[in-house]
Amino acid sequence: MDKVTLETIGRHLQELRIERGWSLSQLAAAAGIAKSNLSRLEQGNGNPTLDTIWRLAMQLNVPFGNLVAPISVPVGEEGVQVRLIDQGKDEPQVDVYWMTCAPHTQREAEPHTPGTRESITVISGQLEVGTLEDRQKLSAGETHTFDADSPHLYRAGENWASLMVTIVYAGGGKRS
């Protein structure tokens, strides 16, 4: 991630943590990361994985987009890039992302807040996506919607896959 992205994420993390009256130790323990790593992130340093950012968002009870907005560059890790396109202003909270996955990449995602639904529309390539019990193989133009409050995965085929990810939070994705 570039410096501006890291600084934005760090500023948002620190603001949300302080707003809730939590110490670095409390948030780090709740998210399952080292206090020193959280401290570096808040200072705009480090190299967080997507899972780390998601876990922090979950503990802070905010959508992933609240930590990365208004960043317009992709945030990612090996083989996966995610870019926030828009966050709705109404209830329920709706976030929309552009995501790309390198060939043969698999990303296992942790559960979102209870009641969250996710819709994936493949723009190009092929992707297997969904919960561990309800996965679908999709090609360009196909969509799969599933309950994202349980572990789920994205697995690209032999080519790059690009997709639109729409996340609808059921009351748990509040802005701060």
Image (spheres, rainbow, N blue to C red):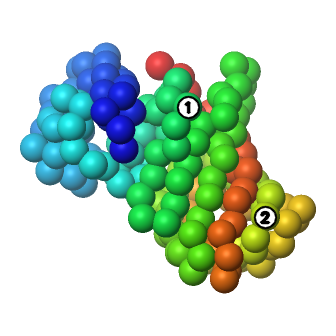
Q: Residues within 10 Å of mark 1 (few under 14, many from 20)?
A: few
Q: Is residue 148 above or below residue 60?
A: below
Give the residue displayed 42% in from the left and 39% down from the top: 57
In this view, the residue farthest toward the right is 141
Q: Is residue 13 visible?
A: no
Residue 19 position by quadrant: top left
Residue drawn 68% across the image and 76% down it: 159
Locate residue 164, reporting x and y percent: 73, 51
Q: Quadrant of the N terminus?
A: top left
Q: Is residue 140 above or below residue 93?
A: below
Q: Observer-nearest residue: 107 or 92? A: 107
Secondary structure at badge 1 equals loop
Residue 134: where, in percent of width, then height?
Answer: 71, 75
Mark 2 residue element: strand
Report, in whole angstroms, how far the alpha carbon at label 2 lies from the one at label 1: 21 Å
Query: Sequence order check: which comes first, mark 2 or mark 1?
Result: 1
Which image quadrant is residue 96 in?
top right
What residue does disc 1 label? 72
What is the count of numbered marks? 2
Q: Nearer the viewer, residue 11 or 47?
A: 47
Amino acid type indicated by mark 2: Ser
